[in-house]
Image (cartoon, rainbow, N blue to C red):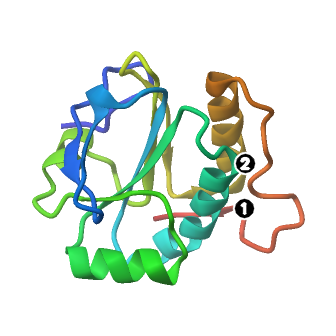
Amino acid sequence: MTTVATGEQAPTVALTGLDGQVYRLEEAEGPVLAVFFKVGCETCRLIFPYLERLYQAYPQLGWHLWGVSQDSATDSRAFADKYGATFPILLDEGWTVSQAYDPEGVPASFLIGSDGRVMRALLAFQKEALNELSAAIADQIGAQPVVIVPENDPAPPFRPG
């Protein structure tokens, strides 16, 4: 298998969230940003506050941000609470969806358009790419783009997963 590439049809997502709701890609209205992560990943810890900023930047504007955890519900809930995530956390304990997307590592983010195709893929933590994701989401939902990672932000420009 290889990682799902930009322009390809996104594999099906049907996972249960920590809230008990089942999230299905084909039922989502608007673009979906699916972010695969593991609670023990240092780079995942770094990116999560920025993902929350992104989620808060465009509240209720016809898009979705789903954290796809490769860990247990207990560990995933503790991680989400610790890093202040208010977006849905989906559980992929058997890694079925993770294997379908086959990212080279985590965190791995896939922006999936309304047509079900991958619009952008991002591996690791990249300041510039997070702002590009924000702009792409804004374009898709007809909003003004919001800078998620300002130039003076103290995080490194890049951190591998």
The residue lying toward the viewer, choosing from 36 and 53, is 53
**Relative height, residue 31 to residue 49 (above, below):** above
**Which quarter of the picture shows residue 127?**
bottom right
Give left or right: position of 4 versus 1: right
- Give the quarter of the figure containing the N terminus: top left
Give left or right: position of 68 versus 135: left
Give the farthest residue toward the right: 152
Q: Residue at x 32, y 33 (%)?
A: 4
Q: Residue at x 24, y 81 (%)?
A: 74
- Give the quarter of the figure containing the C terminus: bottom left
The residue lying toward the viewer, choosing from 94 and 22, is 22
**Label 1, on which residue?**
157
Give left or right: position of 105 versus 42: left
Give neighbour class at mark 2: few <14, some 14-19, many 20+ (Cα, 10 Å): some
Residue 122 location in percent, x, y?
51, 45
Residue 124 location in percent, x, y?
51, 58
Residue 31 location in percent, x, y?
48, 30
Element type at mark 1:
loop
Element type at mark 2:
helix
Confirm or deny contact between disc 1 and disc 2 (CB under 8 A): yes
- Residue 56 has which mark? none
Q: Earlier in the sequence, mark 1 or mark 2?
A: 2
**Label 2, on which residue?**
128
Q: Amino acid at mark 1?
A: Pro
Give neighbour class at mark 1: few <14, some 14-19, many 20+ (Cα, 10 Å): few
**Which quarter of the picture shows residue 76?**
bottom left
Q: Residue at x 63, y 26 (%)?
A: 141
The residue lying toward the viewer, choosing from 30 and 137, is 30
Q: Residue at x 40, y 57 (%)?
A: 88
**Relative height, residue 73 to residue 35 (above, below):** below
**Relative height, residue 64 to residue 94 (above, below):** above
Q: How many marks?
A: 2
